[in-house]
Amino acid sequence: MSRYRLAPTPAQEAVLLEHCRHARYVWNLAVEQHGFWKPGRKSAPGFAEQCRQLTEARAEFAWLRAGSIVVQQQALKDFAQAMANFYSGSHRKPVWRKRGRGEGFRVVAVGAGDVRRLSRNLGEVRVPKVGWVRFRWSRAVPEGVKSFRVTRDRAGRWHVAFAVIPEPVPAPGTGEVAGVDRGVAVSAAVSTGELLNAPALRDAEKVRLLRLARKLARAKRGSNRRGKVKAAMAKLKAREADRRNDWVEKTSTDLARRFDVIAVEDLKIGNMTRSARGIVAAPGTNVRAKAGLNRSILSAGWGRLVERLEHKAPGRIVKVNPAFTSQTCNACGHRASGSRQSQSRFRCVACGHQENADVNAARNIRDIAAGHAVNARGGDRDAGPAKREPQRVLPSG
């Protein structure tokens, strides 16, 4: 996706919000329909049947007919795709959408004249029932755009994302392999010795966010004051997310341009950030500490960094087993938990090698990836594989 900041007028924003309401309403109706389905009964209505039902509903209700048929049908298309992802096991089951969360809609059948440039920093896109809406031309719009999605975040900002698959970053061709170790204190340590940190809120912004959180706790639910406080908090969190995404984009592009192969740990981030709260019968322990650790992991952008690396350098990302990468000495190969003396200090108990602990782990990840094909069959990288097919002995002479 190539995302740009939209700048609708107040009148255009009202129509965009109406499109979001229609898309949310159609989506929730589809969720309710599938909620009545039980195993053993007739299958729930699919996309074609739901489109036919939508046509009948538009003929009966004027308020629904006043909206865009493209927006409403694409909401059903998105739901059909979400159900397909659920049945394939890659995603969870679709749930109800709430007002103010995940607001947006999709538009298809975009023509060549539906996106145009007005000036150096300004462009326009044609939205059904809205007309030409201006957006910031921060970079060139890719050619061959067939669809786009308009979204509104919790901070009240509008964006348009054009669905175009960009070209991958070309490999440098040097044959160099890099290992990347992701952590909490250091967001990403590279085997070259670089320590990279994802930007966060400044100290003054953190203090303001804490004050707003206390103010939100005192505000009455449903009041205008509570809505204003939530909007102020959303702006701060959106600022933090923008900084983190910008860091991820720049870091992933830099790594993809410099290295032919990039090795990362195969981390199960969803399992690592699971809540430790437990249940009433068996409450968890150290819940507050675990919640803080979860926030630190998510704010470091672990998953997003690897995801963007796979997009920009497809086929050049190697995921290795993370076991013992932080306890193994990269100089002599000795493994001992006592070598990791602190978060940042590594001193091998066998050979005395000292190094930053995250850099040492990143170099272990790099070395595992460099000999991944041999190690998968057992044996040493230099001696060769231990598990291999028996070789036929040719008769001499």
Image: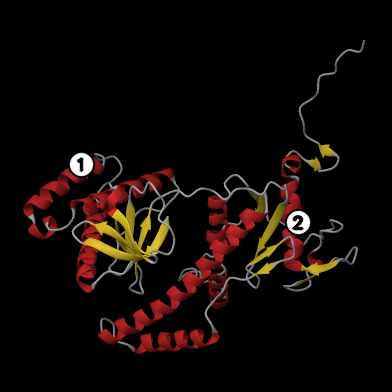
- Disc 1 residue type (three-letter): Glu
x and y percentages locating residue 315 in the rendered image: 60, 44
Which quarter of the rendering shows the C terminus?
A: top right
- Disc 2 residue type (three-letter): Asn
x and y percentages locating residue 200 in the rendered image: 54, 76
Q: Residue furthest right?
A: 397
Q: Which of pointers 1 and 2 lies earlier in the amino acid sequence?
A: 1
Q: Secondary structure at mark 1?
A: helix
Alpha-carbon neighbours of circle 1 within 10 Å: few (<14), some, or many (≥20)?
Answer: few
Q: Return the residue at label 2.
A: 364
x and y percentages locating residue 130 in the rendered image: 20, 61
Q: Nearer the viewer, residue 139 or 333?
A: 139
Q: CA distance from mark 1 to mark 2?
A: 55 Å
Task: Name which quarter of the figure residue 223 lies in.
Answer: bottom left
Q: Return the residue at label 1.
A: 49
Seen in the image, is 358 located left or right of residue 301?
A: right
Residue 202 in view of the camera? yes
- Name the colour scheme: secondary structure
Q: Nearer the viewer, residue 120 or 161?
A: 120
Q: Nearer the viewer, residue 40 or 14?
A: 14
At x 81%, y 36%, the residue is 386
Of labels 1 and 2, the one closer to you: 2
Q: Is residue 1 above or below residue 338?
A: above
Seen in the image, is 343 located left or right of residue 332?
A: left
Which quarter of the rendering shows the N terminus?
A: bottom left
Q: Secondary structure at mark 2?
A: helix
Task: Name which quarter of the figure residue 100 lies in.
Answer: bottom left
Seen in the image, is 31 located left or right of residue 368?
A: left
